[in-house]
Every structure is written in C-alpha cells, then in structure tokens.
Image (tube, rainbow, N blue to C red):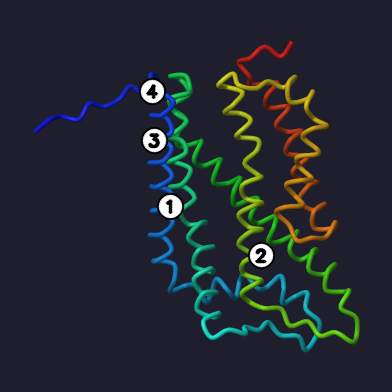
Amino acid sequence: MKKRIKKDPNNMTLLEHIEELRIRLLWIVGGILVALVGMFSYSQKVIEIAVKPLKDALPAGSKIIFTGVTEAFWVRVEAALVAAIIVSIPFTFYQIWLFIKPGLKENERKFAIPFVFVFSVLFVGGAMFAYWVVLPLGFKFLLKYGGKDLSAMPSIKQYMSLFLKMITSFGLVFELPIISFILARMGVINGKDLLKKFDYALLVIFFVAAILTPPDVFTQFLMAAPLTLLYILSIIIAYVFSTKDNT
C-alpha cells in the first residue's frame, strides 16, 4: 500500500491552501451537524430562552404565533442550530487554528489553547451582548410604534431566523481584535495602516450593520457603535503586536 506523503504546510501552493480551507470548513460543518443532532432534544428549552427578549418587550395580551403546519418543527430545528453553533465553538475555532497555524512563527504555534479559548470567549461575549443589550433595546424601540390600534403577533419562525442572524453576527464581529492580532503577528497589517483607513472602516462598519440588522437606524447603531470601538481596539493591538513597521 502506498504511503501518503504529508505536505509541508509552509510550502503549500495556493490550490493546496484552498483545499486545506475546504477540508477545515467541512470539519466545521460536520461538527455543527453532530451538535445539532445532540441539541435537538433541548430545542424547546432553547426557544424559551431565545424568545425572552421579545416576550419582555411585547405589550400585554400579545402572543408569539406560528402560521404554517410545519413551522413549529422547523423552529425547533433552528433553535437546535443556535445551540449547536454555540456548543461547537471550541471545535470550530480549533479548525480555524489548524488552518492559520502554518502562517505563524514557531514560538507562536504553542498558543493553540489560548487562541481557541479567547476566540470562544469573544464569540460568546458578542452573542450575549446581542441577547442582553441589542435585542431588548431594539424590540422596545420598534414595538412602541404599534400604537393602540395595532396588536403585535410576531411569527416565531421570523423571530428565530432573526435571532440566529443577530447572535451569530455579533459573535463574529466581536472576533475583530483577535483577528487583528493574528494578522499583525503575520505582518499583514500594522496600526498605522488601520488608522489611515479609519474613515473607510466606518463606512464598511455602517454598511455591515445595515445588512446584518433589521432595517431601522436604532438597531444598526447598536451594532455599529461596538464595532467601531472594536476597530479602535484593533488599531491599538496592531500597533503593539505588529511585526510590520508602524513608521
């Protein structure tokens, strides 16, 4: 039997890097699917936790409804998916670490566990910020426009889709500081470059906020404000840790 030759990760071609990325993405998706199966039995509890920000903001007498025969089932699936994404975070970021590790220096590769830990904490921190701050404030702001003549009866399917989008979006944008650290250590960016592009970054930030949040200025600002602070923190990190000259 012919022995498989392991490629040197430091001398891989572009196509080999793309293939490595494909493999890591497949592992990530597989890990989430496995977690999804395991979390389905807890999906009802997840729904109860997920709808709390909306229930607290709803006027008295309002109810969360479903209108399709299969809607309740797919909501359970979406709830399990939310839980699966959170539960599989360490595994997901470990796969990301395996992909970027070849670009790091030898003495930096020993930080696998801290890397996975910090990435996981930042993601959960972003998700919790969305859950405890953005969603409650956003719902209170939006629902007050219903007035006395309109009754709020939000669809659970639409809500869970929004919940999943907001939780994952805020979790991902909170990774900006550590992404800045990695790119700075690889010599890709430095603090001076990020500072020069601050005005362009603001445009991108508000554009991303407009895409990822509901179509209202208030909720978009709730995402844009912390993202701007995270970008400023990334500039500081790049100044301190970049291997690229800041002058």
Estimate the spatial distance between the alpha carbons at disc 3 and disc 2, rounded to whole Å: 32 Å
> Which label belongs to residue 181?
none
Q: Badge 2 local density, few (<14 within 10 Å), some, or many (20+)?
A: some
Q: Badge 1 local density, few (<14 within 10 Å), some, or many (20+)?
A: some
- Quarter of image, res 204: top right
Callout 3 touching callout 1 (CB < 8 Å): no
Say how many tags the image has. Answer: 4
Q: Quadrant of the C terminus?
A: top right
For marks 3 and 2, give the one nearer the viewer. Answer: 3
Q: Quadrant of the N terminus?
A: top left
> Which label belongs to residue 12?
4
For marks 4 and 1, give the one nearer the viewer. Answer: 4
Residue at 50% in and 36% down: 114
Estimate the spatial distance between the alpha carbons at disc 2 and disc 4, rounded to whole Å: 40 Å
Callout 2 touching callout 1 (CB < 8 Å): no
- Left or right side of 212 for 17: left
